[in-house]
Image (cartoon, rainbow, N blue to C red):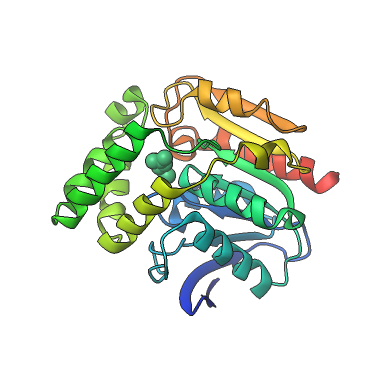
Amino acid sequence: MKHTLLSNGRHIACYESGAAGSLPLVLLHGFCEDSTLWDGLLPGLQGIHLLRMDLPGFGGSDLPLASGMDTSADAVCAMLNEFSVERCVLVGHSMGGYVALEFAARYPDRLAGLGLVHSHPYEDSPERRETRRRGIEMVQSGKRDLYVAQLFSSLFAAAFAGQHPDTVDALIENAKRQPAAGIIAALEGMIARMDHTATLRNASCPVLFLLGTDDSIITPEMGLQAAMLPDIVDIHVLEGIGHMSMYETPEKTVEIVRSFWEFCAQR
Ligand code: MLT
């Protein structure tokens, strides 16, 4: 069911399903995506109290007041408060993982588990910042559609993209519906985001790492290095999978997320 709430005076679209009462599982999408990213996993997550949201600037949510992972982390907190959720398992895909890490730094007591799906705790390299600045210029000059087409074409393992062009196209079409100002705010927020090595080192809850051997954005090396930081980790490196495991191997992805949630719920 769809709900709209206010965070810093801005509307946030969020979606609730499953049985309230169990430990809630919160799913955050990545860059140029929205909460529909997780649609293919929903049948496999039945019975779990599930919360999803469109991060500020994407889907049905308003633009953020200020760019930054902190603004999005506060929106996650506003959603938990709205649904009277004290603690949850928070799982983020890529940029959603950056938001989840910011949430973990700000509200550590609200987490029973932290899941990083194709994500990592490190700040941007100078080269990555430069690439993002070029992206901002491209979107500002009216080339949003070209920008997202190039972006999503590179996110999948080559074999999957060749066999499933419709899936890639559907994500590109969805990304073309995201407002240019939201894309720019997210790029600015990722450029400015802080390193969360200490957040992971200090994490008192279990941390999930889901990585793909063919992920060109978050390499398995980066993820494995980060997985050394927390005390309790659940690591999965999926062979032949790129940045989009929820599309490339949905059964395996839902099994991993569900098992992690069960582990956190039983502690
Ligand atoms: C994402 O998928 O959210 C982004 O590609 C993450 C990034 O650019 O660092």
| 164 relative position to 70: left or right | left
Nearer to me, 210 or 143? 143
Location of residue 125 in the rendering, given as x and y in whole percent from the top left corner: 40, 33
The answer, for residue 245, to whether it is visible in the render is: yes
Quadrant for the N terminus in the image:
bottom right
Ligand 1: quadrant of the figure: top left
The answer, for residue 32, to whether it is visible in the render is: no
Nearer to me, 165 or 12? 12
Nearer to me, 200 or 90? 200
Nearer to me, 261 or 249? 261
Q: Residue at x 23, y 39 (%)?
A: 150
Quarter-of-image position of residue 59: bottom left
Q: Is residue 19 above or below residue 168?
A: below
Location of residue 142 in the rendering, given as x and y in whole percent from the top left corner: 14, 57
Q: Residue at x 68, y 30 (%)?
A: 229
Location of residue 130 in the rendering, given as x and y in whole percent from the top left corner: 29, 38
